[in-house]
Image (cartoon, rainbow, N blue to C red):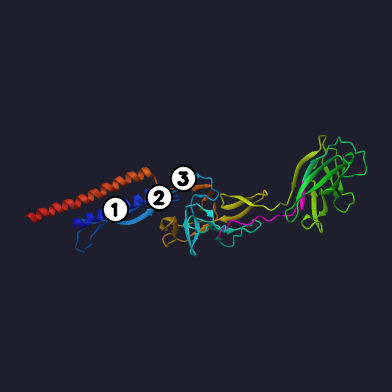
């Protein structure tokens, strides 16, 4: 009996060494959770055995538990390194099945799919070409491999200060080629539907106290814009405090030749002069914000705490590319370890509760960072010494029993 008891102790100590060694081996594995071996004693059961006289028959390995504590988060210089701070697991697709991981080392493959080191796609909500996230279905997330399409300018939002002390120009009528016929010129960049860049020139001509005419032209030589032969867009007036009083709203609609088709059609534009003032100081721009953009190439992407992946393009535009989801479980300890830093759902873990990062009972994400292994090497080395002594002690039990048996044989 004592041989079997000691052998079970040897097996237990060996299993403990296996678990500790696995922890040490994974001390630098991103997202790894420290494991521990859990043991239970064993007793022989018999109806005639008195409880007070029971002698144990050894030990058995009852469970290897992974302890899901938060690992240290370390910043990296990789856009698609993602750390989970709090509860939850990344959802990955493996041969049509969903698996889960805390390892946030991702990269785009040759098709733009976001995958881990083993090529498993990261799951979440996709975004359309306008950056609108579709929360109706969970799909593999994708980084666009094509340029961002250009958008034509429709509105020029601008505000200026027009110098109240400027005199009325002596040269009349207005002419874009005669600088003495206007008080202040400026240009606004705009884009056609193909992303071509063009300039719209604006001219401000003082009529009288508190009244200014606005003219526009485009191209070289200057071609007047709009239906007016001289390119007059309208008149703005100000009160004695320098505030814009008319028109209200302070917008002017006009057309320019469409550069996308060589001027065969026109491109409609609106000039919005809201917040323009007339103070006794130099003429100048206080804001100039035309909409529209040229085509853009994706330069980098960032991951927000809510899991939204935002792409930054060479044309200065930013667009949502998708949103990462997190899955939490009623009992994460019940997950089965599938290797490769992924886990599988079991009846013991309960059903995955999938939601966006930051929602109830789900952690947040940190882009450009990774969650380190939770293995404490110092503690594991101490545990290694303890397990070694356990093994030696059980070996001594066998040696002692052998000595007793030899004594009996010699009798």
CA neighbours of label 1 inside 10 A, class few (<14), some (14 to 19), many (20+): some
Residue bearing the label numbered 3: 72
**Which structural element holds mark 3?**
loop
- Asked if residue 330 is among those painted magenta in the image, a careful observer would answer no
Q: Kindly report the secondary structure that dominates the magenta region of the rendered protein.
A: loop
Q: Earlier in the sequence, mark 1 or mark 3?
A: 1
Q: Give the CA separation, mark 2 to mark 3.
A: 15 Å
Residue bearing the label numbered 1: 14
| Residue at the limit of the structure toward the left, as seen here | 411
Labels 2 & 3 near each other (Cβ < 8 A): no
Q: Give the magenta-colored segment's residue range.
A: 140-157
Residue bearing the label numbered 2: 26
Q: Earlier in the sequence, mark 1 or mark 2?
A: 1
Residue positioned 16% across, 53% down in the render: 401
Res. 188 visible in picture: yes
Which x, y percent locates residue 55? 20, 56
**Which structural element holds mark 2?**
loop
Labels 1 & 2 near each other (Cβ < 8 A): no
Which x, y percent locates residue 94? 48, 62
Q: Give the CA separation, mark 1 to mark 3.
A: 30 Å
- Please state if 373 lies on the left or on the right of 61 as rendered: right
- Asked if residue 150 is among those painted magenta in the image, a careful observer would answer yes
Q: Give the CA separation, mark 1 to mark 2.
A: 18 Å
Which label lies toward us, 2 or 3? 2
Residue positioned 20% across, 49% down in the render: 396
Which label lies toward us, 1 or 3? 1
Res. 247 visible in picture: no
45 relative to 197, above or below: below
Which x, y percent locates residue 88? 49, 54
97 relative to 296, above or below: below
The N terminus - image quarter:
bottom left
């Amino acid at each position: 009996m004592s041989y079997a008891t000691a052998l079970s102790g040897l097996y237990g100590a060996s299993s403990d060494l296996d678990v500790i060694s696995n922890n040490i081996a994974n001390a630098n594995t991103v997202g790894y959770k420290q494991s521990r071996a859990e043991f239970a004693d064993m007793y022989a059961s018999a109806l005639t055995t008195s409880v007070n006289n029971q002698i144990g028959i050894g030990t058995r390995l009852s469970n290897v538990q992974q302890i899901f504590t938060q690992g240290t988060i370390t910043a990296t210089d990789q856009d698609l390194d993602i750390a989970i701070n709090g509860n939850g697991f990344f959802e990955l697709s493996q041969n049509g099945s969903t698996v889960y991981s805390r390892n946030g080392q991702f990269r785009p493959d040759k098709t733009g799919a976001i995958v881990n080191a083993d090529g498993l796609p990261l799951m979440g909500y996709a975004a359309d070409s306008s950056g609108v996230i579709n929360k109706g279905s969970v799909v593999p997330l994708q980084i666009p491999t094509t340029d961002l399409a250009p958008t034509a300018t429709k509105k020029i939002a601008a505000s200026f200060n027009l110098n109240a002390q400027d005199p009325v120009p002596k040269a009349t009528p207005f002419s874009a080629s005669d600088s003495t016929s206007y008080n202040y010129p400026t240009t606004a960049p705009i884009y056609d539907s193909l992303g071509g860049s063009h300039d719209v020139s604006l001219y401000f001509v003082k009529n009288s106290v508190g009244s200014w005419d606005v003219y526009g032209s485009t191209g070289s030589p200057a071609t007047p814009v709009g239906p007016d032969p001289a390119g007059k867009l309208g008149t703005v007036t100000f009160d004695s405090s320098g505030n814009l009083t008319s028109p209200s709203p302070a917008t002017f609609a006009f057309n320019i030749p469409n550069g996308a088709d060589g001027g065969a059609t026109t491109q409609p534009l609106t000039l919005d002069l809201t917040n323009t003032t007339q103070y006794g100081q130099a003429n100048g721009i206080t804001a100039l914000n035309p909409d529209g953009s040229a085509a853009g190439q994706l330069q980098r992407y960032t991951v927000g705490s809510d899991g939204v992946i935002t792409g930054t393009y060479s044309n200065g535009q930013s667009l949502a590319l998708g949103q990462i989801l997190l899955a939490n479980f009623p009992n994460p300890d019940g997950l089965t370890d599938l290797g490769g830093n992924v886990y599988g759902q079991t009846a013991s873990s309960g059903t995955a509760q999938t939601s966006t990062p930051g929602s109830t009972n789900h952690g947040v994400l940190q882009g450009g960072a990774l969650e380190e292994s939770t293995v404490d090497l110092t503690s594991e080395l101490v545990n290694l010494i303890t397990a070694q002594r356990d093994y030696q002690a059980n070996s001594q039990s066998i040696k002692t029993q052998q000595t007793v048996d030899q004594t009996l044989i010699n009798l």
